[in-house]
Amino acid sequence: MAMRWWCAPLLASVSLASMAQPDWQATGMPFSTTRITRFHHDSVQDVFYIAGRVQELPDPGWNSNVLVRYDHGQWEALGLFDYSLFDVVVYRDTLIVVGYFSNVDGNPIANVARYVNGAWGSMGDFSAQVHRLRVLDGELYAAGPFQTVDGQPANGLAKWVGGQWQPVGLPPMTNPSAFMPYDVALYQGKLYLGGTFSFSGTYQDIMVWDGVSWEPVGGSLLGGLNWVNSMEVYQDKLIVGGVFDNAVGNAGNAIMSWDGSTWAPLGTGIQDASGNYHQGQQVYCLKEHQGLLFVGGTHNYAGNVPSAAISTWDGHRWCNVGDAVFNGNNVVGIGFYEDTLWVGCGPYIDGDSVHYMAKWVGGAYSDTCSVAVGVEEPLGAEVAGVRVAVLGEGQLAVHGLPDGRHRAHLFDASGRALKELVFSSTGGVGEPVRSVGLAAGGYVLQVPAGGAVRFVVDGR
C-alpha cells in the first residue's frame, strides 16, 4: 500500500483557535478516530506512531483502520487494517503492530503484522488477537488471549527468538474463554503477566514466571470483578494499574505497588468525583517520563487533590496535570514526542473538541499536589513578611516570597496535612492557586522559607 502523507496546519489552527483551555490542545490529526490506546516514539528515526481506531478522511468505513505515523508536523497513514490496532513498537529496526485484524492492505494477515521494505507482512500465526507488545531487556514479548502460536501451545504469552515465536512457560489456562492477558512486565529478573483470569484459587489477574513455574503474586488481586490493565517498573517497584477495590483487602484502589514480597498503596491513591474510593475507578495506562510516573484513568482526584483523568506520582506525592475537565473523564493512552505529553482521551476537553487525542502545551505539569507521604513536614515558626490572600472562586495567593517556583504544604488548624500547592512568585506577588474544598476555619501554610503562615477562610 502506498504511503499517504498529510500536512494539516489549517486543521490544527482551527482546532487550537477554538480551545479555551491553554494547557491542552488538539493535535490536528487529519484522520477520524474514536479511540487512541497506544503511542510509540521511535527514538532512532525520531518519529511517533499512534495506534487505536483510526480511519482516513473521508471515512472509508469503520472496518478500515490505519496506523498513524507523525514526523515533525507531517501525518502519514500506514496500511489498511480491517479492525482495531492495540499496540505498536519498533523492534530491531522493524515496525510491528498487533490487534484484532485479519486483513491488511487486502492480504490475509492476522493479529500481528510487520512493515518491511514498504509493505506489510505476516509475523506469526496467532490463534486470537494480541493485546500487548513489550520489549523487555532487549527481547520482544507478545501477550493476549491466544492459545497457540504457529501451531504450538502458547497460552497467552510468546517471545520472539531466532526469527520465530516461542511459548514462555505455558501460563495456566483452565478456562480459555475467560483468560485475557493485557500486559507483561519484567521485574527483579522475573516475568509478570497481568490481565483478567482466575483459577486454582490464588491465581487471579496477575502471576509471575520465575523461570521454572508460574506462581501467584502476593495472594493476587482480591475481590470479584478485577483486572490488570497496565504494569510499569518505577523506583524499583512494580506499579500495577487496573480495576480493583481496596475495600475488599487490596492495598490500593485501582493502583498499587509490589516490591517482590508485599503489596502497598501509592499514598492515598486515586478517588472519584466525591473524593471517595469505589470499584468503578480504573487505571488504564502508566508511563514513566523524566522521573515521574504518569497515570491515566477515570479518576477525579489523586492523593485527595483535584486531578481529573491524568496525574503524576513521584514516589512521595500525587500531583495534577493542569485542571482541565476531560469530558467522559478518561485517559486511555499516554506518550511523549519531542518532550511533549500526548494523551488518548475522550472527544472533548473543557467542552472543546480534541478528537479523542490531545497534547500538553501548559508548561509545568502541576499546580496542585498532595502532601508528601513518608517525609517529615514540621510546620515551623511564623514567617515575617509572607501572607496568604484568600481570593474568590476557591483560590489562594501567597505574597512576599522570592521570585521563582515554590512548593507550600497546607495543613488545617489541628495540624492535619491537606495538600501541596505549587506556584510562582514575581516581585513578591504570588500567582493564584486552586484551593477548592476549604471549609471555613483556620489553616497553616508551610512555606519554602522554612516556617509557617497562618490564615483564616471565613466561608463567605
Image (cartoon, rainbow, N blue to C red):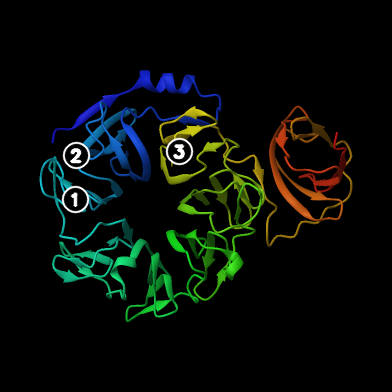
For numbered disc 3, what is the local secondary structure?
loop
Residue drawn at x 75%, y 60% as measured from the top left: 376
Residue pushed farthest left?
A: 107
Residue drawn at x 36%, y 18% as measured from the top left: 10
209 lies above or below 95: below
> Sequence order check: which comes first, mark 2 or mark 3?
2
Foreground residue, 443 or 163?
443
**Amino acid of disc 1:** Ala
Task: Verify CB contact (< 8 Å) between mark 1 and mark 2.
Answer: yes
**Amino acid of disc 3:** Gly
Q: Which residue is mark 1?
A: 113
Task: Verify CB contact (< 8 Å) between mark 2 and mark 3.
Answer: no
Q: For the residues marked 1 and 2, what is the alpha-carbon distance in whole angstroms?
A: 10 Å
- Quadrant that contains the N terminus: top left
Image location of residue 217, percent across then percent down:
46, 74
Q: For the residues marked 1 and 3, what is the alpha-carbon distance in whole angstroms?
A: 28 Å
Q: Which residue is mark 2?
A: 79
> Sequence order check: which comes first, mark 1 or mark 3?
1
For numbered disc 1, what is the local secondary structure?
strand
258 lies above or below 60: below
Label 2: few (<14), some (14–19) or many (≥20) C-alpha neighbours in 10 Å: many
